[in-house]
Image (cartoon, rainbow, N blue to C red):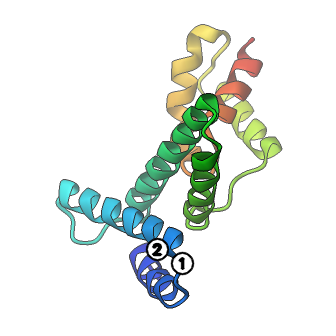
Amino acid sequence: MSLLERLNNDMKQAMKDKEKDKLSVIRMVKASLQNEGIKLGKQEMTAEDELTVLSRELKQRKDSLQEFENAGRIDLVDKVRTEIGYVEAYMPEQLSEDEISSIVASTIEEVNASSKADMGKVMGALMPKLKGKADGSIVNKLVLERLS
């Protein structure tokens, strides 16, 4: 079942269950997917394209969460946390920190990185491997630790 089909089924269920917040998030994600499809000029999007859109949606919400926490807007923090939970349900399973660490170590060896100056080279090779499976900030932290 494609992501769009899954979203449609979940949207119908959210309507039946009268879950307004969930319905709103599903509609936003669905609209983002459709807009990306139009932008790319594709009728059918690949799983990687869908993952890119989901990652973008999740990152936007996490950034918003951080801003609302800094501003002390507890009412909005709770709402965004709920939205993040809904979006994460469509993401692939996240790797553990140990799994990420081993992939980081092998990638550093692969590109012969030895110092922080090689950070860009390592991240460039690493992120396609971990796309959607790991939080970029965790990956960044682990790479910095290894290169220090």
Question: Measured from the top left, where is residue 30 in percent x and y?
Answer: 36, 68
- Secondary structure category for the residue under label 2: helix
Q: Is residue 4 above or below residue 12?
A: above
Q: Residue at x 58, y 25 (%)?
A: 122
Q: Residue at x 53, y 37 (%)?
A: 63
Q: Is residue 55 above or below residue 143?
A: below
Residue on which disc 2 sits: 23
Q: Is residue 105 above or below residue 21?
A: above
Question: Measured from the top left, where is residue 91 in percent x and y?
Answer: 57, 61
Question: Measured from the top left, where is residue 87 in percent x and y?
Answer: 55, 61
Q: How many marks?
A: 2
Question: Measured from the top left, where is residue 17 in percent x and y?
Answer: 55, 87
Viewer-closest of 4 and 40: 4
Q: Residue at x 64, y 52 (%)?
A: 78
The CA span between labels 2 and 1 is: 6 Å
Viewer-closest of 137 and 65: 65
Examine the image and state in which quarter residue 92 appears: bottom right
Examine the image and state in which quarter residue 31 appears: bottom left
Residue density around tag 1, few if under 14, some if 14–19, many if 20 or more, within 10 Å = few
Q: Is residue 75 above or below residue 20?
A: above
Q: Residue at x 52, y 40 (%)?
A: 64
Q: Is residue 57 left or right of residue 129?
A: left
Q: Are marks 2 and 1 in contact (CB under 8 Å)?
A: yes
Type of amino acid under label 2: Leu
Q: Which of the image's four quarters has the C terminus?
A: top right
Residue on which disc 1 sits: 19
Type of amino acid under label 1: Glu
